[in-house]
Amino acid sequence: ATDFGIKDALNQLGVNPINEGTSTGSNCFSNGELIESNSPVDGALIGKVKSTTKEDYEKAMKAATSAFKTWRTMPAPQRGEIVRQFGDKLREKKEALGKLVSYEMGKSYQEGLGEVQEMIDICDFAVGLSRQLHGLTMHSERPGHRMYEQYHPLGVVGIISAFNFPVAVWAWNTALAWVCGDVCIWKPSEKVPLCGIACQNIAAEVFATNNLPEGISCLINGDHKVGEFMTKDTRVPLVSATGSTRMGKIVAKEVAGRLGKSLLELGGNNAIIVTPDADIKMTVIGAVFGAVGTCGQRCTSTRRLIIHESIYDKVKEAVVDAYNQLRIGNPLDENNHVGPLIDTDAVKMYQNALTQVVEEGGNIVVEGGVLSGEGYESGCYVKPAIAEAQPDYKIVQHETFAPVLYLLKYSGEVENAITIQNDVAQGLSSAIMTNNLREAERFLSVQGSDCGIANVNIGTSGAEIGGAFGGEKETGGGRESGSDAWKIYMRRQTNTINYTTELPLAQGIKFDL
Ligand code: UN1
């Protein structure tokens, strides 16, 4: 079998293919138990990475806090210049990193490249931002006084990222945090540790070339126990965590318990409303990419189609037709649309969802199933499935991280579809397909979608980095990436300066001595 240039990619990224536990990557603090990284693509062992012990973590913290002292004093635009160089390195390594993402995580090579492109884009964004970390000036109520606010670096930012976006979510956080003057400690998902090492190598090279301390970017490895080192640590003022709602609730509690800040980007249960005025062709592309892209493992994946009864059969037929064209297989082979799930546990969750939807009364319209035989040896390849269901089924209310799409029917006005859409615990992404201005505006109004992302004539996934990314309710409320998401990475200070020889008190209070 061809290796699709994987060996070459690993070489370019300085990731030792079968690492029998020697030190891995630059400034990677790990000497603990070995974590194996197996590819869901072919089931092969790609490498082993040592996990981070408490002792290693203390070393990482020491490197980070000491690096912060240097980094925070560097003018922000100069930090931007470093991030620019990091973005350039990513451009050089785009193909190699995209390939590793695809091979270690299982998303298609196109999507792997897309993920690296998101990293490059956020670097560009951060470079510009490095000259725009501005606060406001206010008019003081006292004569001869000036009042303004400024933003200072926060310190050590902890980043916990999920397996599904092994590199981009880290970059959204770290590129902003870096220009803001913070240093970062990153714990990637233990399911994709080699992606972490590859990124860390690239960052370390840029810092070394510029004679900057490596501790600006630290990598720690392991499961939730390693994440806990950061959530419990008062030296980490901000923990940014992406993953399941279950994980987010634990992180939120820990961090809030010590009055730290957390930035949470958790589960979604994203729907597309399809109204009688929808463009069916666009709907099909948006819905199918949204539901089967990344094998249904994006937090923005389309899980529910809420279709008006008058066009229900037509839309169903078109979507089913598109599913019949899907080619499932090695994601590095660009002929395939759908790659594997991350591991066999994910396959079980997918199977359970399909069993449950039938038990609850659902009707399968595109059969699922686990694929076996040549090319499917890893046991992680499944068929994207579609079920007709009711909005209140427990399984429909639940986020299953797999390619299972539920068709729901609505009647009457668009309000009814919006009610169904909002009636779930999660609030990440949402979309409406319509050429009717009234419907679109209602969907975007205060009575409309309650999600952090609401799109018109676009699917639920594939958000651009320029906007703030995140959602409401059980999605956690955090915002990452574009717009003014940078503010959470800085501490805010209000400054009032008196340039007179008097000391008038605010609120007109008299206090004569
Ligand atoms: C995620 O799944 O955690 O909007 C992030 C999207 C991507 C990011 C998804 N830009 O689908």
Image (cartoon, rainbow, N blue to C red):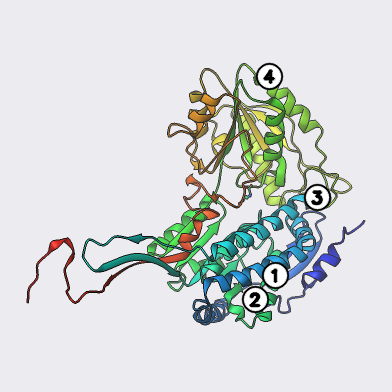
The answer as to whether callout 1 falls within 8 Å of ligand 1 is no
Q: Position of residue 446 (x, y in %)?
A: 43, 34
Going by the image, does 60 lie left or right of 330? left
Mark 4 neighbour density, 10 Å: few (under 14) some (14–19) many (20 or more): few
Q: Which of these two is toward me, 105 or 481?
A: 481
* Mark 2 → mark 3, Cα distance in angstroms: 29 Å
Q: Which of these two is toward me, 511 or 285?
A: 511
Circle 1 is placed at which residue position? 197
* Image quadrant in which the N terminus is located: bottom right
Q: Secondary structure at mark 3?
A: loop
Circle 3 is placed at which residue position? 331
Q: Amino acid at mark 4?
A: Asp
The answer as to whether callout 3 falls within 8 Å of ligand 1 is no
Q: Amino acid at mark 1?
A: Ile
Q: Tell me whether the residue at label 1 lies in contact with that at label 2, contact meaning CB atoms closer than 8 angstroms.
A: yes
Badge 2 or badge 3: first in the primary sequence: 2
